[in-house]
Image (cartoon, helix red, strand yellow):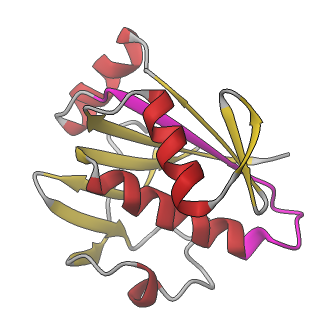
Amino acid sequence: MGLDNSLELSTDMTPEQALHLMAEWFEFKWGDDKHLIGPALSISAIEPGQGWKSIIQEGFHFSPDLSVGFRLDPNSNDYEEGNRVMLRATMLLLEHGRDGVLLFNGEQITLQRIAGRLVLNADSRNWTDGLQLENEIRLPHEKRSLPSPLL
C-alpha cells in the first residue's frame, strides 16, 4: 500500500508543464505520458475538479489550478530518498505557483504556503522524520502546528 500525498497549487502551469518540469529537473523516468517514476515514488498531475477546488477554497482561501499526486512506497529501500525528492519537487513547484498546500491522505497538512508564508506542520510525522529540513528548505519558513480545516 502506498502513502498518498498531494500538492494543491494555485499556478499558471498546466499538469503537463508541471510533469515536464519535474522530469527535467529531477531526471525522473516516464511511466507513461501522465506519470513519472522516482525513487520509491510515483507522480501524477491533474487539474482538480470543481468540487475539490471548492473544498480547498473554503478550507485554505485559495483555489488550486493543479493537483500533483505523490505516491510513496513505504516498503522500498529508497523510501527516505523518495521523501526527500517529494519535498524538493514540492519546493520547486511552489516556486512556480502562488499559494499551495501539501496534504497527506487528502486531509492532513504537511506544509503550506499561503500569502507568501511557508509553514511546516510541526505535528506532521508521516514523512518529516529522518529528514534534515534545514538542509532541504532554503526558503524562509516557520514550523508550527497546523490543524487541518478538512478534518
What residue range appears in magenta? Answer: 64-80
Residue 60 image-quadrant placement: top left
The residue that appears at 29% across and 18% down in the rendered structure is 54
Residue 77 at x, y percent in the picture: 88, 73
Residue 57 at x, y percent in the picture: 23, 27
Where 82 falls versus 130 (above or below)?
above
**Magenta span has 70?**
yes
Determine if residue 17 is in view: yes
Q: Is residue 93 left or right of residue 132?
A: left
**Magenta span has 54?**
no
Q: Is residue 36 left or right of residue 13?
A: right
Residue 139 image-quadrant placement: bottom left
Residue 123 image-quadrant placement: bottom left
The residue that appears at 39% across and 38% down in the rendered structure is 8
Where 9 falls versus 110 (above or below)?
above
Tell me the quarter of the image containing the C terminus: top left
